[in-house]
Amino acid sequence: MTMAAAKPLAQSSRVLSYAGALLETMDGALRDHPNAFIMGQGVDDFKGIFGSTTGLAEKYGAKRVFDVPLMEEGMTGVAIGAALVGDYPITTHIRADFSFLAMNQIINMAAKYSYMFGGLMRCPMLIRIVVGRSWGQGAQHSQSPQATFAHYPGLTVVMPSSSQAVLDMYPAIINRHPGPVISIEHRLLYNLDFTISPADKRVPLTSYVAREGSDVTVVATSVMVLEALRAAQYVQDRAGVSAEVIDLNSISHPDWELVAASVRKTRRLVTADTSWLEYGVGGEVCRQLMMRDPGLLRQPPAMLGMAPAPCPTAKSLEDIYYPSQHDTVDAILTQAKGKNHGIDLPVERSMTEGYKRFRGPF
């Protein structure tokens, strides 16, 4: 599936997959920063974390791109120690759930060093975390823990939704960001192609408007940004409803004034996240809006996320566990026209129908 614009590409534009953008930025980090290294389970494998580190071990050597034992807490401690003495570690968890085994190091150590030592010690590092959704991974390999990490001061949490976001944010993070950054990458994005815009259009390390609109505001994260953009086009074509889509992008440091300004304009809100609703990102969006102006919304918001249960392994059950394009379109139309809107909904019910068919867990 190609997310390229319909208009002719500008001379400096190109089409690049999400995995390709990751590979470019990982290559650039090693090329431009002699103190950078990549570590993680499978980073030197021939598949290279779904193609995002392929060939880098051969190009830069085993001292800078290397596999690690199945001991996430210990290896994260090694990375933190390297960061404290001036190196730049890039660690990768091929499933988000594996990072739970390193929570002590991430939350108690990396997030707090700058605070505990009055800024004299810093821990700049990038932790890449892959969400395993839609690959039959089941309860222990499909979680999306962005709200958990964003809860703790000292961590910067981003969820790049496109190749452009990866190309713009990762170098900025590696070049200048003073503390630990957790980037949550959605597995469904890896094989998608995106149009890369000219250099004057940058994805910031905060939120931005992905599509302008006037009737409903959709605040989305990660792959749900793409779902929201598809739904926005559908409701525009079928019902003349204008949906504004905001990519929250940085879960820990969003632009809340940008979100509030949009909702102040539309008076209607849909949140679309890749995780559970309870105590999640969508709930924080609503809290921030209510703190700024309790009268912003004309009606209760619609909220999309995972069903409140562990993820099933069976593909038929997984298809109805996650919000689909059917659900996203219905939520926007219900906000704009009411529950009995009478507009035909997409027949597509599984998110993977619009992206990539299931072909096995890895």
Image (cartoon, rainbow, N blue to C red):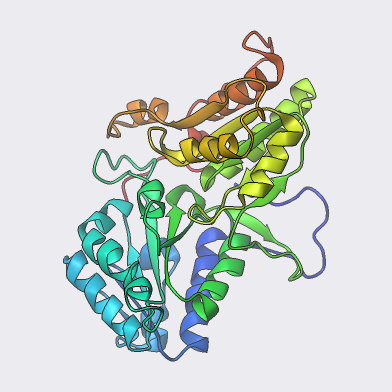
Residue 79 picture location, percent across and down = 29, 77
Which residue is found at the position 24% from the left and 55% from the top? Answer: 100
Near-viewer residue (304 or 40): 304
Counting from the top left corner in percent of width and height, residue 126 is at: 41, 70
| Horizontal side of residue 125 vs 313, given as left or right | right
Instruction: Name the spot of residue 322 as percent of width and height, x first.
Output: 42, 31
* Left or right: 338 as drawn, with respect to 172: right
Which image quadrant is residue 135 in?
A: top left
Task: Tell me if I can see residue 243 in this picture.
Answer: no
Q: Front-most of 293 and 314?
A: 293
Q: Residue furthest bottom?
A: 34
Q: How many marks?
A: 0
Give the quarter of the image for residue 65. bottom left
Question: Can you say whether 109 is above or below 241 in the image?
Answer: below
Residue plotted at (39% across, 79% down):
122
Q: Position of residue 334 (x, y in %)?
A: 63, 18
Asked if residue 98 lies left or right of residue 250, the reply is left
Answer with the quarter of the image where residue 43 lies: bottom left
Note whether residue 255 is visible: yes
* Residue closest to the eye, 243 or 166: 243
What residue is drawn where x is 33% and y is 79%?
Answer: 117
